[in-house]
Image: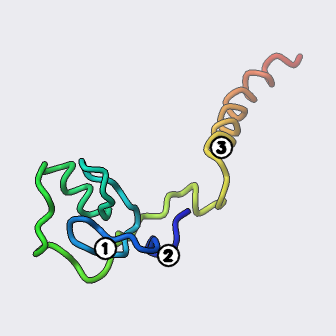
Amino acid sequence: SLQSAARRAGTSCANCKTTTTTLWRRNQNGEPVCNACGLYYKLHNVNRPLTMKKEGIQTRNRKLSSKSKKKKGSSSCLALSGVMSDMIKPLVSFQIF
C-alpha cells in the first residue's frame, strides 16, 4: 500500500538515510533504499552522492491524455472494444438489403 510519501515505520534509506520516498527499493545487500538512490544505482552502478539529496520529493506535471479527460476510470480494454464495434458497424449495414 502506498502511503502519503511512503513513510514506513522504522525504515530509512541505507544510502542517504531519508525516511520518505514514493517507493522503497532494495540494494545489492538487501537493505532498503529510497526510490532515488535505487534508480541512481541501477543507472550508474555507484551509490547516489549525498550532495544530490533533495529536501522534498520531485514530481512532474503530467499531461492529461484525451481519454482520461472524457472518462476517469474507464479501462483501455473497454475503450478498444468500442473502437472495434465502430469499425464493424459499416460492414454490417452493407449486408442489410
Residue drawn at the location 38% of the way across and 70% of the way down = 11
Residue tagged 2: 4
Q: Where, by quadrant of the figure, is residue 35 drawn?
A: bottom left
Residue tagged 3: 79
Q: Quadrant of the C terminus?
A: top right
Q: Where, by quadrant of the figure, is residue 70 drawn?
A: bottom right
Residue drawn at the location 80% of the way across and 25% of the way down = 93
Q: Where is residue 21 in the image (x, y as percent from the top left)?
A: 37, 70
How is this picture coloured?
A: rainbow
Using residue 39 as the reference point, say whether residue 11 is left or right of it. Answer: right
Amino acid type assigned to the residue bearing label 1 in the image: Gln
Q: Which of 69 and 23 is in front in this view?
A: 23
Q: Is mark 3 on a helix, strand or loop?
A: helix
Q: Cα distance, mark 1 to mark 3?
A: 32 Å
Q: Cα distance, mark 3 to mark 2?
A: 31 Å
Labels 2 and 1 touching (C-beta < 8 A): no
First-in-chain label (1 vs 3): 1
Amino acid type assigned to the residue bearing label 2 in the image: Ser
Please tell me whether residue 45 is drawn above or below residue 3 in the rendered image. above
Amino acid type assigned to the residue bearing label 3 in the image: Ala
Please tell me whether residue 12 is drawn above or below residue 42 in the rendered image. below
First-in-chain label (3 vs 2): 2
Residue tagged 1: 58
Q: Position of residue 94 (x, y in %)?
A: 78, 20
First-in-chain label (2 vs 1): 2
Please tell me whether residue 74 is drawn above or below residue 7 in the rendered image. above
